[in-house]
Image (tube, rainbow, N blue to C red):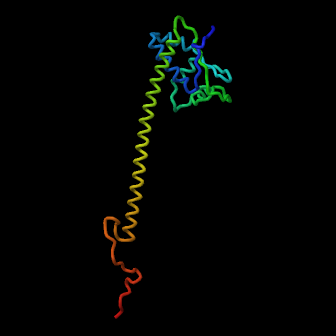
């Protein structure tokens, strides 16, 4: 089975799961049934590290795509892939080649174009969500900073009132003050 350059993709390890999802959506839009898509992913899709050559199957890419972020995966190889590292422990490569095998009359060029379109749409949604998230975080930080400044100003005003007997800018300072040492030492009779 000879593969042309249109049948091979090179991408970062982090992109394997999203590629699987995008390929699934593109194949579904191309009119393939679920059993045909399962066959393609099981038998006609594989990835290999560009440095060490370790291979992963399409099914393993599917497990990676469907895995939740919080829980560790049973297979340490897939867990390393999810973290953005090569599947082989000790390999420091961050890139994989994904080989798209021949399948009946499937035109991988059209599927890849659709996959790229779907991936761009997903990236745009992610960027929009990230922008909204950034604005929310910035708003929370501004509220916290404003609250902190308000607390400091209130504490300073209280201190000034406690020690000097008036609030600056709201009350005039007292012209005369009593020396605390002289209090209680009035004239003796």
**Residue 41 found in image quarter:** top right
Q: Is residue 108 above or below residue 77?
A: above
Give the image location of residue 133, x and y in percent. 43, 37
Give the residue drawn at x 60%, y 11%: 4
Question: Residue 144, image x and y in percent?
Answer: 42, 49
145 or 74, nearer to the observer? 145
Q: Residue furthest left?
A: 171
State the residue at coordinates (43%, 32%).
129
Q: With 125 as the anchor, is 39 left or right in this view?
A: right
Asked if residue 43 shows in the view, the reply is no
Q: Where residue 161 appears, x then y in whole percent?
A: 36, 68
* Above or below, comparing residue 114 to residue 83 in the picture: above
User: Residue at the spot x=55%, y=23% of the render?
Assistant: 16
Which quarter of the image is occupied by the C terminus?
bottom left
Q: If the image is split into quadrants, where does the N terminus sit?
A: top right
Q: Does any portion of residue 104 appear in the rendered image? A: yes
Q: Going by the picture, which residue comes out furthest to the top? A: 104
The residue nearer to you, when weighing 153 against 184, is 153
Q: Residue furthest bottom?
A: 189
Residue 35 sits above or below residue 55 on the image:
above
Where residue 61 sits: x, y (%)?
56, 21
């Amino acid at each position: 089975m000879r593969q042309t350059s249109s049948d091979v993709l090179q991408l970062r390890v982090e992109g394997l799961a999203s590629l699987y999802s995008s390929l699934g959506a593109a194949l579904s839009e191309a009119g393939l049934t679920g059993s045909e898509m399962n066959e393609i992913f099981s038998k006609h899709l594989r990835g290999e590290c560009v440095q060490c050559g370790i291979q992963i199957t399409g099914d393993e890419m599917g497990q990676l795509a469907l895995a939740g972020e919080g829980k560790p995966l049973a297979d340490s190889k897939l867990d390393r892939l999810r973290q953005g590292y090569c599947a082989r422990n000790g390999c420091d490569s961050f890139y994989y080649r994904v080989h798209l095998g021949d399948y009946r009359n499937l035109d991988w060029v059209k599927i890849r174009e659709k996959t790229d379109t779907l991936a761009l749409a997903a990236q745009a949604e992610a960027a929009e969500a990230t922008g909204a998230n950034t604005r929310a975080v910035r708003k929370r930080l501004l509220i916290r900073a404003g609250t902190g400044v308000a607390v400091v100003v209130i504490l300073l005003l209280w201190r000034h009132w406690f020690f000097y007997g008036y609030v600056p800018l709201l009350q005039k300072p007292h012209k005369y003050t009593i020396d605390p040492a002289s209090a209680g030492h009035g004239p003796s009779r």
